[in-house]
Amino acid sequence: MDMSLPDWVESWARNAPDLKVPPPGPKSKEIIAKDRLYVSDAYDRLFQFTMKKASGSAVMDADGNVYLDFSSGISVMNAGWSNPRVTAAIQEQAADLAHSMANDAYFDKEAEFAELLARISPGGALQSSFFGNSGAEGVEAAVKLSRYYTKGSEHIAFMGSYHGRVGNALAITSRVKLKYGHGPFPPGVFFAPYPYCYRCWFKQEYPACDLLCVDYLQNAILNFGGPSGSVASLIVEPLQGEGGYIVPPKEFMPRLRRLCDDRGVLLVADEVQCGLGRTGETWECDSTDTVPDILITGKALGGGVPLGAIVAKKEVMSAWRPGSHSSTFGGNGLSMASGLAHVNEILDEKLAERSRILGIHALKRLNEVKENHDIIGDVRGKGLMIGVEMVKNRDTKDPLLVPEIQGLMWRKGLLMITSGMHGNVFRIAPPLIISQDQLDLGINLFEKAVEETEKRMGILR
Ligand SMILES: Cc1ncc(COP(=O)(O)O)c(C=O)c1O
């Protein structure tokens, strides 16, 4: 497979990073000043960074500075920023109609998109879709549908999970920081330990542990931990995203499937972040041949236009009758056109395969970097969903605060964001069309920033 950039990537984006002025430049400062006056402080923006345009795996700020992007706008731009197939689809659709009145009318692209999702769903077994506007809305739909179908009212979620910031999605999200001040939350949500093997909740070693965390879910939480026996669904990220890019052992998802089957609980896979080629598979569920009852998708689904969906077994989705659920903008003209073009581009250009191959290369390079730097505690991931966990000390695994390293990289022109319960996991999640050369360049910049930090800490070997 050719690992260079696609032909359509603009010339300015091929030379990323390319900084014209020390960021933030004067135009960026002006925009930021106005934003600070009028836009809510709720967004936790780490960089003084503005967005002007983007192409391939590079973004440009208002002052013409070009950055190499290792974030894909949080796993959204899988087929590359400003992919011309997606741009053309949006433009053509906008000229016909933007709003498709999904509540009251039928629309060809909505039917076509649902057919495509049915065809590519895990095991081809999920035959019916409902479209909303975001990942969190997909989560809400999954929670509602699982209750409606099972007549249960309780849910199992996982520690470190992230499912969104509204309603039930926030209730099944596990971090205190994200929930602070927003309670009360609906009762009936039980959190189980996710197999975060680097920081095992039970201080075990895999594989000797035989997945004690799943035993605990089965024997302690479900039997004695509180549910009243009316559990509607178990909601899981097959590769945990905001929790720190955590890859569970391969037996994890199949064991959850069996557990759900034994208890008549629906298995809901949240692939909002890890789906659509990101991990080297179309869906991460495919890597363990796990077929969930409901799959949640979002982020990359819309190719940059807001879109989320659930894709469910026909029998499950059929529980909903006309009027059971709806959304004004579900199946929207622009999101359908953009999303269809984006997903077809991911499939036609074999971007999952590209992600898998580049991921193997990046993991090897990052493990070499780890060999020389003690503040790198763990390197893990699949495809181009790689986490690098930073620590003060490899033995104690005390989390290292990383804004300084992040700032150093940004000033060198590399956009890298973090995740993890301690906020100390760098994500390597570039657009899947990134070239191998750009990937290596970014990893070199990361290593330089790590070196500078270790020098300052007085621990450079
Ligand atoms: C796994 C997962 N589920 C749901 C969401 C929520 O998606 P949105 O921000 O589009 O509502 C996210 C967002 O990061 C996510 O990573």
Image (cartoon, grey):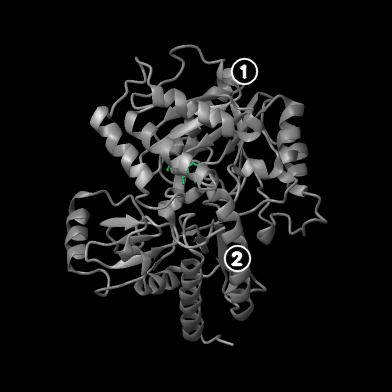
Residue assigned mark 2: 361
How far across and how far down the image is residue 46, in percent?
36, 62
Other residues around mark 2 within 10 Å, as few (<14) / some (14–19) / many (≥20): some
Mark found first going from the N terminus, 2 or 1: 1
Of tags 2 and 1, which is closer to the observer? Answer: 2
User: Can you say whether 37 is above or below 424 in the image?
Assistant: above
Instruction: Work out which residue is located at the far top of the displayed protein and give it.
Output: 322
Find out whether the residues at labels 2 and 1 contact each other: C-beta distance under 8 Å.
no
Look at the image and tell me in which quarter the N terminus lies. Answer: bottom right
Query: Callout 1: few (<14), some (14-19), or many (20+) C-alpha neighbours within 10 Å?
Result: few
Residue 435, can we see it? yes
Report the residue at 43% width, 48% height from top. 76
Residue 303: give x, y in percent of width and height. 40, 43
For residue 192, side relative to residue 105 (left or right) = right
As drawn, 457 above or below 248 = below
Residue depicted at 53% across the width and 31% down the height: 117
In the image, what residue type sits under mark 2? His
Q: CA distance from mark 2 to mark 1?
A: 42 Å
Q: Amino acid at mark 1?
A: Glu
Beta carbon at label 1 within 8 Å of ligand 1: no
Is residue 245 something one can see in this rendering? no
Residue 304's place in the image compared with 384, above or below, is: above
Left or right for 218, reference 246: right
Q: Which residue is mark 1?
A: 315
State the SS at label 2: helix
Looking at the image, which is closer to me, 377 or 336? 336
Q: Secondary structure at mark 1?
A: helix
Q: Position of residue 411 (x, y in %)?
A: 35, 73
Q: Total of numbered circles in the picture?
A: 2
